[in-house]
Amino acid sequence: MGGGRNPMTPERDPARIEEAAEADDGAALRWYHKLGALIYVFFCFEIGVFLLLFPWLDLWQRNFLSSLTPEWLDIWNSAYLRGAVSGLGVINIGISFAELFRLRRFARVRPSDSVQ
């Protein structure tokens, strides 16, 4: 009568899926994953510092975009636009620190010698 497949077959059992995912986490991470994560952290931090500081430098006013039309010059030199760009820099710096703290996923769990 049923003829259908059992939805809780071993392939679909949530407990087994979780166990397999936990077992694969430690084995799948290699040195290039760590290096890629460090490069990403450095890149986010560098872009964040640039976006935070550049709008307040003199170079901000002397570029191609600010000289396109005279109407855009007021907007380009507005403290609101500069603050918005600096805000994006703060967000990038926050992302870099969040990713830096996520690097703990690469730490190896060592069994304690005191557990008996």
Image (tube, rainbow, N blue to C red):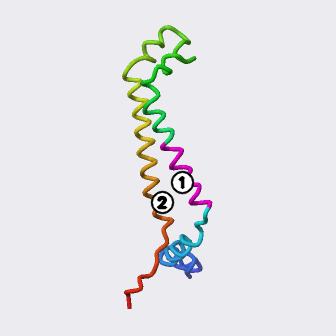
Instruction: Please name the residue that numbered disc 1 is placed on.
Output: 38
Specify which label sits upstream in the sequence, 1 or 2. Answer: 1
Please report contact status of discs 1 and 2: CB closer than 8 Å, yes or no: yes
On the image, the x and y values in percent for residue 75 come to 43, 16
Q: Which amino acid, by three-letter code, is at mark 2? A: Leu
Q: Position of residue 78 (x, y in %)?
A: 39, 18
Residue closer to the observer: 69 or 47: 47
Residue 42 image point, x, y percent: 52, 47
Q: Is residue 107 left or right of residue 84?
A: right
Could you say which quadrant of the image residue 29 lies in?
A: bottom right
- Point out the image quarter for the C terminus: bottom left
Q: Residue at x 45, y 63 (%)?
A: 104
Assign the N terminus to one quadrant of the image. Answer: bottom right
Front position in the image: 103 or 114: 114
**SS label for mark 1:** helix
Categorize mark 2 by other alpha carbons within 10 Å: few (<14), some (14-19), many (20+). some
Alpha carbons under labels 1 and 2: distance apart? 8 Å
Hey, what amino acid is under mark 1? Leu
Q: x%, y% of residue 27?
A: 58, 72
User: What residue is rendered at 45% in x and 58% in y?
Assistant: 102
Determine the image quadrant of residue 101: bottom left
Residue at the image position 48 percent from the left and 43 percent from the top: 45
Check residue 21 for magenta coloring. no
The magenta segment is 32-45
What's the mark number on residue 103? 2
